[in-house]
Every structure is written in C-alpha cells, then in structure tokens.
Image (cartoon, helix red, strand yellow):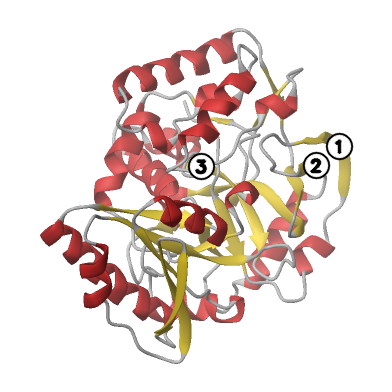
Amino acid sequence: MDTIRIPEILLPKSADMTLWAVNACDQFTSDKNYWSYLDKLVGSNVSALRLIFPEIYLNDNPEMRIAEINRAMRDYIDSGVFKEVSGGFILVERKTQSGTRTGIVLSIDLEDYSFERGAKTPVRSTEATILERIPPRVKIRGDAPVELPHVMLLYDDRKSSVLNCVRRGRVLYDFTLNMGGGSVKGTFIENAEEVKNRFYSLAEKTNFLFAVGDGNHSLAAAKACWDNIKYKLTDNEREVHPARFALCEAVNIYDDALCFEPIHRLVKTRETEKFISGLQTCGGKNAYLLCGGKKTEIPFSDNVPEGIRLLDKYVNTFIAENGGEVDYIHGIEELEKFTAEGGLGVALPAIGKEDFFALIASGGNLPRKTFSMGEGNEKRYYIEAKKIK
C-alpha cells in the first residue's frame, strides 16, 4: 500500500491568517449574510476566500466567478504570496466549542480512492455521490493551478497509535479563525514516514484506510479531473503528476472533539400541511418535525441510514409533485431559525461512531448528507494549498 504521500504544501508567507482562512464552501448555503459579511471583512486582503467558490453562489454568474478564482490563484503564485513546506505532514489542532480536534494534513493517491458504492479501495466514499454535482466542481478545478482542501478523512484508531507516534517540529501557524470558527494551530511533523507506517498498520487486515468524512463531492471532482488527465500522460509523467495526489486532513474518528451531527432536512414548500399528512416514519429512535416555530417528536428507524433513504425518497417525490426545494442544514439552531421563517424541517438522529466503519464496509455508501462532523462553524477552514499543475 502506498496511498499516503508526503506533500509539498503551500502556506501564505505573511498574510493576516485570520483573514486568510475561511470556512468550507458547502457551509451556510441558505445564509447569504454569512458570506457577504465575510466578503466585506476580507476586503482587499489576500485570502483563501478569493480562491474558492462558495456554493451559495453556484447559480450566480458561475463562469465569471471561476475565471476570477483562477486569475487570483495565478496572481497569488506569481506575486509570491505562498511559501513551500515540504518533507513532512502538518499536525492541525483546531479548538472549537466541542474541544480540540487533532488532524494530520497529508496527500492521498487518487488511484486508491473510489466514490462507487461497495468499492474496496483504501480510501472510500461515505455517502452516495450525486453524479450531477461533479461536473460543476470539475469545471471549477479544471483550470485551477492549485487546490485548497476542505476534505476530511476519517481513520479508525481506538488506541490513538498514529498521534502517539507523532514527533512535533516547528509551529507553522497559530491564530484565531474568523466568523466564530475558534482557533487553529499547525505544527510540522518531522517523522512522516513513521506516521505513514502507523496509518498503514490500521488497515493491514481490511485494506480500509480512510473514509471520507467531509468533502465527498470535492474529492470525487479531484478524481474525475485526474481521470481526465492521466490518459494523456506517459507512464513516467503519470507516476508523479501533482493532480494525481489530493491534499486532505485525516482525523481519528474517536477524537473527543469530533462530533457526529446529523444533517437535517429543510423543505421549502407552501404545502406544509400536505407534506406533514403524507409523512410516514416508524421505529425506536426519535426525530423531530419543525414547522412555524413548533417542534414535534416523531418516531424514526433504528437503522438510521435506511430511515434517511426512505425520508429522502418521500421528500423528492413530494417536491416533484407539489413543487418546492430541499436544503441540508447543519445544526438544530439553524434549522429552527429557518423553519420559523417558513417551510418545515425534519431534525434527524445521529449515527454512532462505533458503527460508522462497519456500516461503510458492509453496506457501501450512506445516503447523501447523512451526517456532519460538528456544527457549521466547526468545519475545516481552508488554510493549506497544493499545486495540481
């Protein structure tokens, strides 16, 4: 197994890091105020915000936005915004309201990753990948000279054997994150080869090294871009091409500060009563129906993934027949806020950490948007970058 690679990481040389780092592009997709405030906060400063495409703007002149992103990437490279960190991984310690979450920034070989359900590759998708969502991301990535990851990989390490072997080097960054994201510290890992071998020891019997916790569609887009490129290369070029390797952060699923939160459904429809009357759920777990500021407990399947599949099928059928749309909300407070303003929500139960890897290994992908790792402001912020051209 040679899935893990030691990347050449790009970090800003002298930026205001609080303005540089920004939250994952797929967060706060119903909250324009979040992104417009962040845009004003960043202003003309160098920032990862200028290098990403917040999903709330996917239907707002995307061609122009993609061109601006690519232009900013080239400008940042040409003007010397970045410095290179090579020869090791980065230990990331992220403080949020849930505690301190510890991850390792590394690269993976996309040849060892698949988003197909039931795949037995070392790196596996955790949720059903919507193929229609890949082309827009491929378009964003297609001409981009660098990538900034919000992909978080999970690994199964009850004894924390990987982190226990890490040898810390110099501190690369240590700062407060904007928009209530807490704080983050990055430290160079000096013994990357030893850390790699500890990772591999976790998967000796199963060949299941990493499950994609966050950023499934972004990693799928990276894979699609690589597949588009590799057949045009010689064998030697294919072995070392930077687009073959994707930058990610790996986090132990048993990290005390890694909270598995359900992703709730917000159904925007004028036919709320009709939706409620047709909704049928059963089982020994509890979910909640939110509408007009009221919260009602409803039964839910003991097999949470199967219950979500049935719920999503009902939601999609209802929207097809009655109009409306569905959004996926991180955090019960956000759901309560939006359902008080209109529409209705279904607050879902969470999946247990101890069941997670077994569910993926036995049944393949979970339904799309089944779980989230923490609240929206706990998501991975864009900090590190890597060349892909």
Cα separation between marks 1 and 3 = 25 Å
Mark 2, residue position: 185
Instruction: Mark 1 and mark 2 in contact? Answer it, CB < 8 Å.
Output: yes
Q: Which residue in the protein does label 3 denote?
A: 245
Residue 170's x, y, as percent? 88, 37
Label 1 sits on what residue type?
Answer: Val
In the image, residue 382 lies at what x, y percent?
61, 36
Residue at the far left in the pictured view: 321
Q: Earlier in the sequence, mark 2 or mark 3?
A: 2
Residue 88 as seen in the image, left or right of residue 284: right
The residue at 32%/26% (across/down) is 60
Question: Where is the N terminus found, in terms of image quarters?
Answer: bottom right
- Report how many numbered discs are placed on residues in the image: 3
Mark 2 Cα within 10 Å, few/some/many (few <14, many 20+)?
some
The residue furthest top is 79
Residue type for callout 2: Lys
Asked whether disc 2 touches disc 3, contact meaning CB atoms under 8 Å apart, the reply is: no
x 52%, y 70%: residue: 208
| Mark 3 secondary-structure assignment | strand
Nearer-N-terminus badge (1/2): 1
Q: Percent position (x, y) of residue 113? A: 44, 56
Callout 3: few (<14), some (14-19), or many (20+) C-alpha neighbours within 10 Å?
many
As shown in the figure, which amino acid type bears the numbered disc 3? Phe
Name the image quarter holding residue 127.
bottom left
Identify the residue under disc 1: 171
Is there CB contact under 8 Å for labels 1 and 3? no
Classify mark 1: helix, strand or loop. strand
